[in-house]
Amino acid sequence: AQSVAQPEDQVNVAEGNPLTVKCTYSVSGNPYLFWYVQYPNRGLQFLLKYITGDNLVKGSYGFEAEFNKSQTSFHLKKPSALVSDSALYFCAVRDNTGGFKTIFGAGTRLFVKA
Amino acid sequence: DGGITQSPKYLFRKEGQNVTLSCEQNLNHDAMYWYRQDPGQGLRLIYYSQIVNDFQKGDIAEGYSVSREKKESFPLTVTSAQKNPTAFYLCASIGDRRDEQYFGPGTRLTVT
């Protein structure tokens, strides 16, 4: 069975500091991994994905994520946080063995203080 | 413009009534999804469909039903059997298994 864990309900950082939002996953095969961001009362917007290849993935708005197969993790990072990054962030996983089923984590609220 | 539309944005119903949420896409995507979002619980998968006339239950399918008669449309019916139907409902689609999901703007359902 697929599952995703985002261990932190909220992450607080000061503007200009680096940020990390954690994600660990479980799938029976190899994973396709995704990060999305959600602003209030809106749908989700795609940030980045890992499919195969380089473990460090770069995405929209300066975000990046590192795939770590041994730790089954896919943490989202940004070198310098902006107040406008404050939002709800979701990690998602899909098993690459053939299905379309996609499972999301519970979400992490990022709060960037000026 | 290509995208996913969900209507209406807000929906109010009395307890005991069935209600159908609309999801339409013009992206020519094969797969479509319905998720339910509740505070602190993230997105939970209700149903998904990989192709027309086929769909699979997600993790919380009880009290919901879907149909996929057309590629463009994947309506969700919230039945009176759903114990806690008040939530934010999101529809999504993808064209290929390696693709990211495209999400609609969501429908906020309130049942009183």
Image: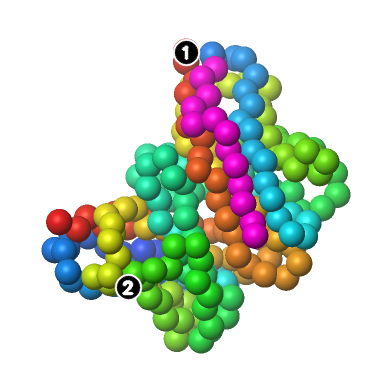
Residue A110: percent from the left, percent from the top?
50, 28
Judge by depth and name the residue closer to the eye, B64 or A55.
Answer: B64
Callout 2 secondary element:
strand
Look at mark 2 in the image and give the residue it sits on. B77
Look at mark 1 in the image and give the residue it sits on. A114
How much space separates mark 1 and mark 2, taking CA atoms? 44 Å
Residue B64: percent from the left, percent from the top?
36, 71
Q: Are marks 1 and 2 in contact (CB under 8 Å)?
A: no
Q: Name above or below for residue B89 compared with residue B75.
A: above
Q: Is residue B19 visible?
A: no
Label 1 vs label 2, nearer the camera: 2
Quadrant placement of the C terminus of chain B: bottom left
Q: Name above or below for residue A51 compared with residue A35.
A: below
Residue B76 location, quadrant: bottom left
Does the magenta run of residues contain A3?
Answer: yes
Residue A4: percent from the left, percent from the top?
61, 47
Callout 1 secondary element:
loop
Q: Chain of mark 1?
A: A
Amino acid identity at mark 1 = Ala
Specify the farthest residue to the right: A53
At x 36% / y 63%, what residue is drawn?
A: B6
Q: Is residue A24 visible?
A: yes
Instruction: Specify whether B106 is left or right of A111.
Output: left
Q: Name above or below for residue B52 compared with residue B5.
A: below
Residue A85: percent from the left, percent from the top?
52, 29
At x 74% / y 59%, what residue is drawn?
A: A28
Colour mapping used in the image: rainbow
Residue A1 location, quadrant: bottom right
Which residues lie in the magenta part?
Answer: A1-13
Amino acid identity at mark 2 = Thr
At x 51% / y 86%, what residue is drawn?
A: B53
